[in-house]
Amino acid sequence: MIHSLFLINHTGDIFLEKHWKSVIGRSVCDYFFEAREKAVEPENVPPVLQTPHHYLISIYRGKLFFLSVIQTEVPPLFVIEFLHRVADTIQDYFGECSEGVIKDNVVTVYELLEEMLDNGFPLATESNVLKEMIRPPTILRSVVNTLTGASNVGDTLPTGQLSNVPWRRVGVKYTNNEAYFDVIEEIDAILDKSGTTVFAEIQGVIEACVRLTGMPDLTLSFMNPRLLDDVSFHPCVRFKRWESERVLSFIPPDGNFTLMNYHVSSQNLVAIPVYVKQSISFFETGPCGRLDITIGPKQTMGKTVEGLMVTIHMPKAVLSANLTATQGTYTYDLATKVLVWDIGKLNPQKLPNLKGSLTTQAGTPKPEDNPSLNIDLKIQQLAISGLKVSRLDMYGEKYKPFKGVKYLTKAGKFQVRT
Amino acid sequence: MRNMSTAVLYNDQGGAEAAVEAGQESTPTTSSSGAAFGLFSTDFKKNEDLKEMLESNKESLKLEAMKRVVGLIAKGKNSSELFPAVVKNVASKNIELKKLVYVYLVRYAEEQQDLALLSISTFQRALKDPNQFIRASALRVLSSIRVPIIVPIMMLAIKEAAADLSPYVRKTSAHAIQKLYSLDPEQKEQLIEVIEKLLKDKSTLVAGSVVMAFEEVCPDRIDLIHKNYRKLCNLLVDVEEWGQVVIISMLTRYARTQFTSPWKEGAIFDENNDKTFYESDSEEKKEQTEAKPYIMDPDHRLLLRNTKPLLQSRNTAVVMSVAQLYWHLAPKHEVNIVTKSLVRLLRSHREVQYIVLQNIATMSIQRKGMFEPYMKSFYVRSTDATHIKTLKLEILTNLANEANISTILREFQTYVKSQDKAFAAATIQAIGRCATNISEVTDTCLNGLVLLLSNRDETVVAESVVVIKKLLQTQPTQHSEIIKHMAKLFDNITVPMARASILWLMGEYCERVPKIAPDVLRKMAKTFTAEEDIVKLQTVNLAAKLYLTNSKQTKLLTQYILNLGKYDQNYDIRDRTRFIRQLIVPNEKSGALNKYARRILLAPKPAPVLESAFKDRDRFQLGTLSHSLNVKAAGYQELSDWPAVAPDQSVRNVEVIEPVKEWAPLVGKTKKSKSEDKFYSDDEDEKEEEGSESSGSEDSSSSSSSDEGLFLSLFRDCGGLFRVSLQVTTPSFGPVKTYELLHHMTGKGLSAKYHFPRQPCLYQPSMVAVQVILTNSSDHSLEEIHIGDRSPASLNIHCFNTIERLEPEASVTVSMGIDFSDSTQAANFQLCTKEDQFSVSIQPAVGELLMPSTMTEEDFSKEQGKLLGMNETSATITMATANTSSQAIGKQVLSVANVGVVSSSQNNVHRFAGRTVSSGAVVLVSLEQKESCAALLTINTEKSVMASMLLRDLKQALAQA
């Protein structure tokens, strides 16, 4: 399946290579560099490439390319999913997935890659199984290890590997038993010039942080599970219980994990929390244009909109922006042509406004199309779909855990066309 | 200078590549560890240093050195000269060091075959290690060493590992099969045998890996799958996610060869059609079978049903593989259930979106209805990557119909204005396709496109011209206005393709624009030499066509252009010019062709069909690499067409025999020779597997429970029988003591009791048989009762089959085997139901770890003679008065220990003999009655711990009344 893996940074240097079968020379990456060159932006590189003898499947994450070399037919998603899992694991171990971090921990990364694939087929991708085999570095442990000569590599088979709950290790102990659930919803929307909704939907995710002793068996139920249109679960969730009773019943993994992703039925009208009044225009006559944006609250369910931010990818011709913001600050990056207006909290009494002039390159025709606005926002303590967790029960263990549920609404891909 | 020497030295050892690397390395690196490496490689002596460190006595130094060596490998640098120093550490005690050595070994073994052989014996030893993790990793490394000479050793190791008790080791052996196969394809036949064996494995851990091996080694041996088909379907949900993908794709292929098409339903309504078709076939018999309404094979249904929950998987590859399975196997009306899940994947990473959109594009051509309700999910955002945008556009175009076309066109209008010009151009193409597909909007589209001709952007205009050209071809009569408009724009258009298109249009429809066309030609004559080749060709064409229709005005112009073309640099243009000249200008040589020039050049031309680039993609299985590239990839397995008649369905049948039924007749047997034991255990193993393959219907558990009841009563009867004839028979039965395994309060209604039936275990001779009675005392039925985790993990238990369902108040007796390894340490494991898991443990009394053995008094004395000294434990005991009779003594001893009575010639001496179950060590018990209640109890066995425990138990039993 997966023959080799090359990690390539944004300048095109291969800084790590790993082969699971016989060694393949680096020259195979030249085909990739060619495609990279052609694509201009790194995001535009096609994920699947064909070369005379190999197939290259790559992902781009954290300014790095994970490039895998394939020799025979394999479902491309299999490889893509796995590469993302590698990136996730690195992120999980070292806090971020970047060139620096990987170079600093090259041996651990190499050991991880060795365990994750055998002969190109995934062997252990479950984070807690890996952590039992190769412990993540901590300052304390590295000090202890240098003093005692102990190592970060376990010599027994991780308990999860053989059990039918591979995601949880045996013998977990905590003095404070706690289970937290974050219900996070993202609004994906496209609004047109006039402010009418072209398309809107809600995607939700339940992130859990569970620190419970032993083998707890949890049941999470909702007040209004009917809202959920399409769901995907962590493997720990018992699908049959969900099918029959619409409750989430599971033995949780230890620590942080994504319990479920859901999609709220598109039949329901999606509440759009803010409205945007905007006018962006470029003048035919001179090398300049005007910009005027006002944002106000729309359907916020009585909550405050926070972390409001507007990002605009300006046309290439725009040289500079001379604007005044009644609230927050704005920056205009000349190289990437991105205008960012960081507003912060939305005050319904005094609506934030950004106004001023834009300078365009002289001699070029006025931009054909007005750039669209990307909006970021956050609303605490609200799930915009109205989803509510009704209760969380624990079976199998005798202690009383501390439980908590938090709600958060965010803007996902929220775009206003102009 | 030092740098120079480094480079030179590297050059000698590692070839040019290393030299380049070393050169690069001398540039300063930023990260801290990078700095260390930088330092290291600028100074070649450091490499010597590494060698010294590796050869030192200090573990920490070695480890440090190995970490640096692995760092080198990771960077793709050559460190093969360290091989001898590294390989010495292969047997290190330090697990991390050992693993790093493994990494090194696998990387360089192929280059240093002779030296690599030095390490082989270490792995061979490790393959026998009691720790399953060490066995597995030894096999992993051994099989990764690509040295042909060790192929026989690998083969042997794989065969052994395939029979290992640990499923993890068996999984590793499945991986090793593929490695060995790629190293030496000659081994195929033997490897297939191992695959066949592993396919029968019922561990979810093994399933994915062995199917992977199957796909790699012998994908055509479909016959190996038959017997395992149902088991694989049933295990699927519990297999790890990567295995699921592989199994699903294999089963898709399997199903297409074994089941008949579910897509014929439509044909049933259409009776007449069907009839004629088959009549022409003139195969009466076939007609009869086919004329019946389609009934789906239950196995086909099983596959569809068991894969459906996986649509909810978090792994996008699993979701995609289920989607393709439904697409290729499900009846048409059921395919729709995959839509939602596929649309959900569009929220995932960009690369995932790319693949999923490709597949949706192929699907949406055939089945618009599937994705139409989700049309808005394919709306393009300005932040999408270009290839994502193009795919979304493709799908939107595929979804367009009379009802939604206005919405789509409005959306397209936004896209045309996009700053991403390649995307804007693709949108124009898409508009063109909509216009041809949906005749109602052709005019609207055409007008829209004409408006775009005045766009400021060149690519947009050019693309519009090309699309308009294609559209006009479909209905040229009404559109001379547009052609005129384009002629006016001609001067401003510089993109060659667009210019060529306009020229072609002029030529083709020159009779509709009689005034303009010659003028355009005039302009072209002026700029001819400066034009691109395609434009020149079209100019020649235009000239020729005008010459034929309007020679009066254009004769000179044509001559001029033909002369220019004759001396053009491009041979195509010279050729074309020559050809055209011969064709249109009459002279003595040109003969007959000339008469037909008009018909040749101005023949009506069929309009081009604008269709999707994904139209033929469905020749590849969805979700495959080949589909993604639209090229057949190496190793792609064609999906066969449905067979007209289903092959024999019974090949998948597996006999379902509950192990319990096998038990009953066995009870009555008194002789238990070793060979017979073996026979049953083998047999049972197979049945076990087959049992688990049966889809586990509800009635199987209830029937078995009644069987058990019957068996139990039989058992009790026999027990009585045996007690009477104790003297002659070896197996002995005391009263059955039942122990509590799980109380119904802690077990949420599930209670479990167990006892030791004192039967040789059927599964393995070294196991102690245990019978567990499971009772459901709750008010709802319990499902999927099975054994979960065990501790210690190496504990060897033969589990009972999962009990699918236990009704309230019902109880069922199941038997299992536990290898206690002759110790009274408790066996801990988890008893699981569908919802819960309960940790339970079975602690055997020492006497239960024995089995009776037959021997004469002489043999007894002989054996006893061998087991003196350290191996003898004795004590004087006081018996209860009630126990002084020889019958009572026998009863008490047998109640404690599963031993056999040895006939005795002396009245005051009682002898009992047994063997330990696991190791078969002889255990001899003799009791010599002294005056009244005192007696000397002697136990002879090499298992001294057992002896003292047994002594204690016997003493206690005999002291009680």
Image: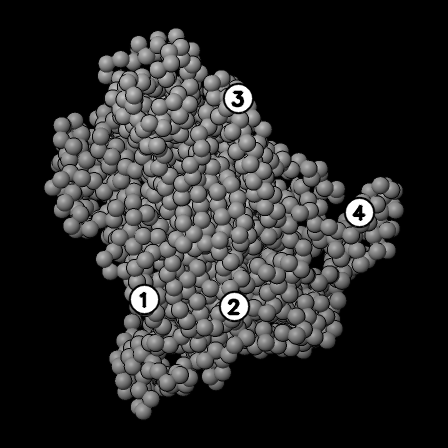
Q: Quadrant of residue B467?
A: bottom right
- 3D distance between C-alphas at marks 2 and 3: 63 Å
Write down the residue under mark 2.
Answer: A229
- 3D distance between C-alphas at marks 4 and 2: 40 Å
Quick one: label 2, few (<14), some, or many (20+) residues within 10 Å? few
Write down the residue under mark 3.
Answer: B670
Disc 3 chain ID:
B
Q: Is A404 above or below relative to B325? A: below
**Residue contact between numbered discs 2 and 1, judged by CB atoms under 8 Å:** no
Give the numbered dot on residue B290: 4
Q: Are marks 4 and 3 on the same chain?
A: yes
- Residue B122, position in %: x, y? 30, 24
Give the numbered dot on residue A403: 1
| Residue at image location 37% in from the left, 17% down from the top | B911
Quick one: label 3, few (<14), some, or many (20+) residues within 10 Å? few
- Residue B610, position in %: x, y? 65, 62
Quick one: label 4, few (<14), some, or many (20+) residues within 10 Å? some
